[in-house]
Image (tube, helix red, strand yellow):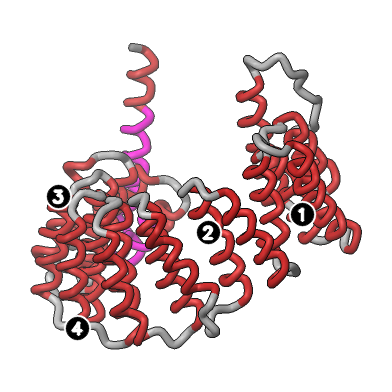
Amino acid sequence: MKKRGLLLGCFVLVAVLVVSGCAKQTPEELFVKGCKAFEGGDVIGAALYFNKFLENHAEHEYAGRAHLMLARTRARLGDEALAIKEYRVVTRKFPDSPEAVNASFELAEYYAMTQRPDEVEKELRALYQRSQDSRIQARALFEIAGAYISNATNPQKAESILREALLIAEDDEIKINAFFGMAEAYIRCATEPQKTEAILREALPLTTKTEERSEALFRMGHAYVACHDYEDAIRIYNEIIHDASVEQESKAMGYLFLAKSHKAEGDQVQALETLEQLRDTLGTTDVAIWSNVESALIVRETTPDQFDGYLSRAISAYQEIMDVSPTMDRAAWALTKIAEAHREVGDITSSIQTYGQIIEQHQDKEPYVDRSRQMIRILRQQLEASPETVPSATEG
């Protein structure tokens, strides 16, 4: 009770100090101080400044901004009801202002985060009706569709909304994104892969960049894989590897996914042949090096001697990359791939040791070091109940 009383007393003292400091300040000064407090992390202080501003200057030109900032402080403090109330004030009292646009999108984002797509649609439909700007209208429709896609329950609804967006889209890139969004809605629900392919076929004539075309084709293949229709997935991945406009790295990924689809169908011979074709055709690509690990996984149960050969070939290739540029990002990347290779084939101890090497040898490569520490923790948890001896790899 004493601690609670002390905290309450401190809050009251802060309020008194802030409000007393507001007495001789202009509206602009009050607003700026509130913004600075918010940016500096003093959310309670910011709320007090904005409240004082609105008590004394409700008709000021900054009033809409103050209500919006107050809504943000309430949201940051976790007060949902008051935050929504302030956002509603902005959209009701200042419907044609930039603040009202921001308020609608921020409120919709909150509803999306809490898995309420119907509320997202209600809020952004109202914005759509208020706005005369086609860019804002298109964004509203994309956000509504995005809420249904994330919810992964109603792909038909998402498609319908994005087809509406197509009607007001001003350029081909927006239209392509709309088609990709429709496809994603069905892929997430693992349903109607033929429809996903048809949607993405509509997008292909609009693609002017090779990566856009490749992405559309890969999404078709992934849609069939998600529904365990490997025969059609194989058809699509074959289309990718024979498409002259597809770049080498994408073509290599096409081979890899084609092999995985053959493996999923139970045709290990064809899977191995496909991976061999990848290495023969595109042997200099990173994907081709990794394909040795995929081959090792396929033969592990049937021909252990080939397993060792494939794995050694992959690790030797990554080791060569490290020898060429031992201090560069490429070397840290190669070590990461070696660690991943060990992990893929179930050699957790060697994987931990390799991640430890990254931490010791590439301390200046922060993303690789952080990822290595995270993986060591995960892998050690996997070994807790194992009779293997956990190596003392450095964790920093």
Residue kind at label 3, given as amino acid type: Lys
The answer to if 39 sits in the magenta stretch is: no
How many residues crowd mark 1 within 10 Å: few (<14), some (14–19), many (20+)? many
User: Which residue does the image show at 18% across and 74% down from the upper left?
Assistant: 163
Residue 168 is labelled as 4
Q: Which residue is mark 3?
A: 85
Are circles 2 and 3 on residues that touch, CB within 8 Å?
A: no
Q: Percent position (x, y) of residue 84?
A: 17, 49
Are circles 4 and 3 on residues that touch, CB within 8 Å?
A: no
Q: Percent position (x, y) of residue 371?
A: 65, 44
Residue 257 is labelled as 2
Q: Nearer the viewer, residue 138 or 51?
A: 138
Residue kind at label 4, given as amino acid type: Ile
Residue 288 is labelled as none
User: Which residue does the image show at 14% across and 50% down from the upper left?
Assistant: 85
- Please provide the residue range marked out in magenta: 10-34
Are circles 1 and 3 on residues that touch, CB within 8 Å?
A: no
Taking the image as drawn, is residue 315 in sight? yes
